Image (cartoon, helix red, strand yellow):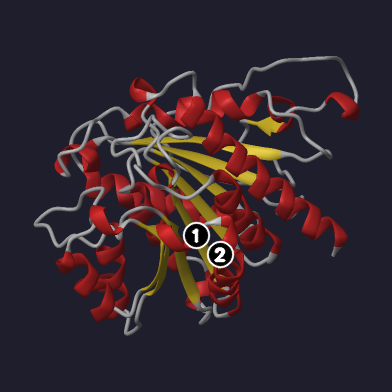
Amino acid sequence: MSAAATIELTVDAAPERWHGRDDGPGNEHLRWHHAISTDTGAPGPWDAAFVGFRSDEGVRRNKGRQGAANGPRELRAALASMALPAPLTALDAGDIEVTDGELELGHHRLGQVVGPLVDRGVPVVVLGGGHEVAYGTYLGLVSTRAVRAGGRLGVLNLDAHFDLRDDVRASSGTPFLQMARSEERRGHRLNYRVLGVSQPSNTAHLFRTAERLGVRHLPDTECGVLNLPAVDAFTDEFIDSHDVLHLSIDLDVLPAAVAPGVSAPAAHGVQMEIIEHVCAKVAASGKPLVVDIAELNPDLDTDHRTARAGARLIHRILTTHQARTTKV
């Protein structure tokens, strides 16, 4: 983001100051809460940007266990005291809230925040909320200069579910079918990949829908450490085939012991080291990147495990991206 750029963004809840452990002055004591600015009118430059999406509406419509609207708060709290390996600066733009059942309007409001942030050349992290957040993120991406100029948009979902449900109303189970239909209206085919799909969690109809849409997927049973070459090939093909990257992380892709605080905990899941490895590869590409992280339900969490797992992934993505761009 250029030093001369200022940001005019409309959010529902203004950003609050981050707080965390403080061991003293100087770069050797840096933690995330030291790096966060909440002044959207400041010129920057920034190395990353955050926006929250406080929504339970999609989970409610999908008949899941509600509570994910408080996810953004907990993710910020878990990230705040994590130590930074090198100085960086990040903007917290505040939150979009869906409190009136109007999920569709919330999607558009989120897109109106995400798009301008991406256009300023920084990785953007959207803190969910239910997985319905992914469609709002997508709306922001398709409005960016890079995509409007013909950049190939790719969506990689780390998830136990396809989330391709064909429901009457949008929900946490529909975002990627919504994207596919939106891309069809734009005259394109959605470039969509899923890593971590659980067969028992997806009906035969959903697998047929994925096949019809040309969705490539890697099952959770093929994402172990012994299958790392296949995971790398799957991830590298995604990165190499696209110019603008949308990484969507549903925390229920992780084993229930690591991520108990989700609407649908995973009986199998993909180990944290594999998910973190994939996230780092995507971040190291240096390509325009938006990450949304979904389904953290603090009411169902145990010892903040899920919040810390999500924060760890965010930390790895943004520090990897910064290290790569600093070297370049």
Across and down, in percent, residue 317 comes to: 64, 49
Residue 41 appears in view: no
**Does residue 101 appear anywhere in the picture?**
yes
Q: Residues within 10 Å of mark 2 (few under 14, many from 20)?
A: few
Residue 252 percent across, percent down from the top left: 38, 43
- Residue at 34 percent across and 81 percent down: it is 189
Q: Amino acid at mark 2?
A: Asn
Occupied quadrant, residue 163 = bottom left
Check the image and name the residue furthest to the front.
226
Residue name at image x 74 percent, y 26 percent: 34
Q: Compared with residue 320, is residue 97 higher up or lower down, i.e. above or below?
A: above
Residue 227 in which image quadrant: bottom right
Can you give x and y, in whole percent of width and height, for residue 180 in the image? 29, 72
In the structure shown, which secondary structural element does the residue marked by tag 1 occupy?
A: loop
Residue identifier under label 2 = 227
Is 267 located above or below residue 36 in the figure? below
Residue type at mark 1: give it: Cys
Mark 1 lies on residue: 223
Given residues 170 and 161, the one toward you in this image is 161
Say whether marks 1 and 2 touch (CB < 8 Å).
yes
Label 2 element class: helix
Q: Decide if residue 203 is on the left or right side of residue 32.
A: left
The numbered disc on residue 298 is: none
Q: Which quadrant does the C terminus fall into?
A: bottom right
Q: Position of residue 71 (x, y in %)?
A: 41, 30
Horizontally, residue 235 falls left or right of residue 29, namely left
Q: Please identify the quadrant where the N terminus is shown.
A: bottom right
